[in-house]
Amino acid sequence: MAAAAPPPPPTSAPVTLPESDPSGNTLFTRIRLATVDDVPHIHKLIHEMAVFEHLIHLFEATPESLANTLFPENPLPPFSSFTVFLLELSYMPFPPTPQNEHFTPILKSIHLDVPIEDPGREMFRSKAIDVSVLGSDVIVGGFVLFFPNYSTFLAKPGFYIEDIFVRECYRRKGLGKILLSAVVSQAAKMGYGRVEWVVLDWNVNAIKFYEQMGAQILPEWRICRLTGDALQAYAHINI
Amino acid sequence: MAAAAPPPPPTSAPVTLPESDPSGNTLFTRIRLATVDDVPHIHKLIHEMAVFEHLIHLFEATPESLANTLFPENPLPPFSSFTVFLLELSYMPFPPTPQNEHFTPILKSIHLDVPIEDPGREMFRSKAIDVSVLGSDVIVGGFVLFFPNYSTFLAKPGFYIEDIFVRECYRRKGLGKILLSAVVSQAAKMGYGRVEWVVLDWNVNAIKFYEQMGAQILPEWRICRLTGDALQAYAHINI
């Protein structure tokens, strides 16, 4: 179904593009660290997620508030705070990426029976690579937002995945798995003990998928949330 | 039941101790940021927690692994990563603490009918204040470990409380509430949107307590956890 892209050559070597697929039925994927320039796309992705989850009434994020909180003026090193991996898609192979001190983008490809009709193509065109260089548009297909958590019993950090989202027209192709495995690989690389996320108990397909990948679904734990007026009231309680 | 301690005088003023209670039935409490010097006590507290929860088989933390992960060589600013508040107890009032750039310790007191018999007094004696200065031992009574999380819908950070623990002999005095409200106050001060934690679904007393404080218990979400061999396997999966 899918094959890993060849490893990038040393950064000093001349850039040679991996072979493209003249049939146009190979979708090349790249996962890279998002930057503040990606905020407009991240905002649209979160908005699509809120619509999909019928939770648009809870959606308060603006491009400005996302930029301020995800990419603050004095940013912490990648992976030590809120981190976004962006999934980019192209029908031409991505150029090899120079090794980066924090993260080398992950290149893969998947074979399609037919190219995917994307009604949001205009809105999700990535500006990271110029079309004239690649010979194809680069389209933002999804994202994953995660950050460190901590287990006192293990005395080890882990990663908590807050959101993982693939745009509707690109689903059921294994792209969610590519995003998820990028986070898990990063956790393993850093010697972290766990990757955790949450799922709705009625989402049996998702639960089945997670169990097949070896995750445990913890049946007894419930999330407690203090927010809004109740948070303000408790913050000023006189004990 | 309890009253807040008077605010500390300006740091340049001579230190004057708040009035003590000659009956010995007032327990003075202080919440402060833990430091690497507190690791031996933090380790013992987590061990007691594991025993209490019948989860000692999952307890792998050592003082060394806790020190390395909670207090690394190049620490991030307090509250931007894993943060520990320590609860200290004394039968003499704590001296006012100079204002700190990150966090001013929270001083409170609670009235007891009789002083508490503490079988772990020796093991949990704090070295933060010398007994000759205070005229009383300072005992570590509990801790809370928390770190930032993030809501994409709010585009705001929050705090996630991983552990909150009060030693057995000091329970049912409102000390857990003092620890919890310290985290909530800090969240409010930083303009954060939420404080979250988890509870076991059969722990009806805890659920009742959390609901009374205004927290929502989210009934539908389940935690998914990838750890150990399954994490390693998925990190190296060939998609």
Image: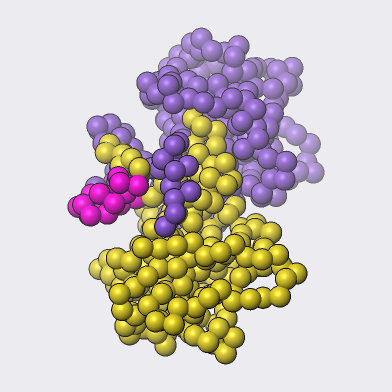
Chain colours: A purple, B yellow
State left or right for residue A92 relative to residue B26: right
Residue A112: percent from left, percent from top:
45, 20
Residue B197: tell me if it is visible: yes
Question: Is B206 a magenta residue?
Answer: yes
Question: Is B209 a magenta residue?
Answer: yes
Q: Name the quarter where the C terminus of chain A is drawn.
A: bottom left
Tell how many labels. Answer: 0
**B55, above or below B223, in the image:** below
The front one of A6 and B25 is: B25
Residue B214: percent from left, percent from top:
35, 42
Q: Which residue is drawn at 49% across and 78% down?
A: B20
**A173, above or below B215, in the image:** above
Q: Residue at x 41, y 40 (%)?
A: A230
State left or right for residue A61 relative to residue B46: right
Q: Which residue is drawn at 57% across and 41% down?
A: B191
Q: Name the quarter where the N terminus of chain A is drawn.
A: top left
Q: What stretch is highlighted in magenta?
A: B198-213
**A34, above or below B101, in the image:** above
